[in-house]
Image (cartoon, rainbow, N blue to C red):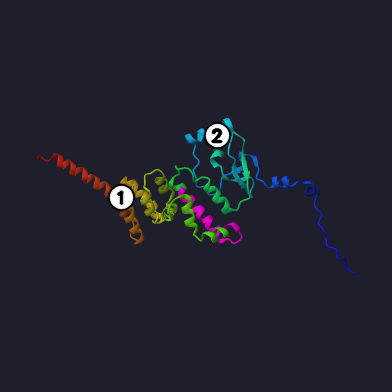
């Protein structure tokens, strides 16, 4: 006759003698000191870490007082840790000749890590257009992906209660319209050389948006046209360049003709002014 007794799993000695407080403490996040060499940048990190005056001030502060706000990182399957938040603090710690920095290590999936990375850097008002463009793009993609998953309880509840698109929620979070969000994201279609000119304020945001619709090879040709004419496109010029591109008629000669217009117009204005001043009354 088979025994009806069920198999009983005995608790471990650690479980028997651990208190509720100690078990809760084990579940809390802890700040640990991690070697700077073990911390790697987040893949596709869109924010520029510059050795500017602000960085030097941060390095001086860390040299005196240490890193006051821990960074956030996640385990890297290839070894070490991937920084999620704290890239500037990491660089400042290097400049301060520190060997370690305080870090909170979390197990985060790609979407959660992306959202934390973007949110931790979107506060400064001095963000470059390129930084904002790629940050918006990365976070929106992560939010959409989270919304598509059914294993994320918090995401399910959020979507059901809000009933809104990810783009609407992102616009509300960053305090900009959906239209402006998408206009920034469109800038990621620019080749690096043109995007750098937007960051350097050589090309305004509205013309840059129009230029983003040009094919990559056309954008490269435009650089040559801009260089030969020593001019950058105005909004109306950028719109015409876009129109010619969409119609399949944009060539380097057309680009040079359009880019040379403003210069010729300015020259005409100067000549007219000179003629008026030199004509006897």
Q: Which mark is residue 278?
A: none
| For discs 2 and 1, the disc positioned in front in the rendered view | 2
144 magenta-colored:
yes
Q: Residue at x 36, y 49 (%)?
A: 224
Q: In terms of secondary structure, where does tag 2 sit?
A: helix
Q: In terms of secondary structure, where does tag 1 sit?
A: helix
Question: Badge 1: few (under 14), some or many (20 or more) residues near its Cα, within 10 Å?
Answer: many
Closer to us: 202 or 74: 74
Identity of the residue furthest to the top in this view:
64
Closer to us: 263 or 7: 7
Position of residue 5 relative to residue 75, above or below, is below
| Percent position of residue 179, x then y | 41, 55
Question: Can you identify the residue that label 2 sits on?
Answer: 95
- Left or right of 24 on screen, residue 217: left
Identity of the residue furthest to the bottom in this view:
1
| Percent position of residue 187, x then y | 42, 52
Q: Residue at x 57, y 59 (%)?
A: 157
Closer to us: 175 or 104: 175
Magenta highlight range: 132-155
- Left or right of 259 on screen, residue 186: right
Question: Can you identify the residue that label 1 sits on?
Answer: 259
Question: Badge 2: few (under 14), some or many (20 or more) residues near its Cα, within 10 Å?
Answer: some
How many numbered dots are placed on residues in this image? 2
43 magenta-colored:
no
Could you tell me what secondary structure mostly forms the magenta stretch?
A: helix
3D distance between C-alphas at marks 2 and 1: 44 Å
Ranked by sequence position, the earlier of labels 2 and 1 is 2
């Amino acid at each position: 006759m088979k025994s009806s007794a069920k198999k009983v799993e005995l608790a471990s000695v650690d479980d028997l003698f651990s208190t509720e407080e100690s078990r809760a403490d084990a579940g809390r996040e802890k700040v640990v000191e991690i070697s700077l060499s073990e911390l790697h940048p987040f893949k596709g990190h869109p924010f520029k870490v510059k050795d500017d005056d602000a960085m030097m001030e941060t390095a001086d502060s860390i040299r005196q007082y240490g890193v006051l706000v821990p960074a956030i990182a996640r385990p890297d399957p290839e070894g070490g840790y991937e920084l999620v938040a704290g890239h500037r603090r990491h660089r400042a710690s290097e400049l301060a000749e520190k060997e370690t920095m305080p870090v909170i290590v979390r197990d985060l999936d790609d979407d959660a890590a992306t959202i934390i990375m973007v949110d931790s850097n979107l506060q400064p008002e001095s963000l470059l257009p390129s930084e904002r463009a790629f940050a918006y793009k990365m976070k929106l993609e992560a939010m959409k992906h989270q919304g598509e998953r059914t294993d994320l309880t918090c995401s399910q509840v959020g979507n059901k209660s809000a009933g809104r698109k990810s783009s609407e929620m992102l616009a509300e979070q960053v305090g900009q319209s959906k239209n402006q969000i998408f206009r920034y994201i469109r800038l990621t279609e620019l080749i690096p050389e043109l995007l750098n000119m937007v960051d350097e304020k050589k090309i305004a945001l509205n013309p840059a948006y129009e230029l983003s619709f040009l094919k990559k090879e056309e954008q490269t040709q435009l650089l040559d046209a801009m260089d030969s004419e020593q001019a950058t496109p105005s909004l109306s010029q950028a719109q015409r360049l876009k129109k010619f591109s969409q119609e399949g008629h944009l060539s380097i000669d057309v680009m040079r003709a359009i880019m040379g217009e403003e210069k010729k117009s300015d020259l005409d204005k100067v000549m007219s002014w000179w003629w008026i001043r030199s004509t006897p009354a």
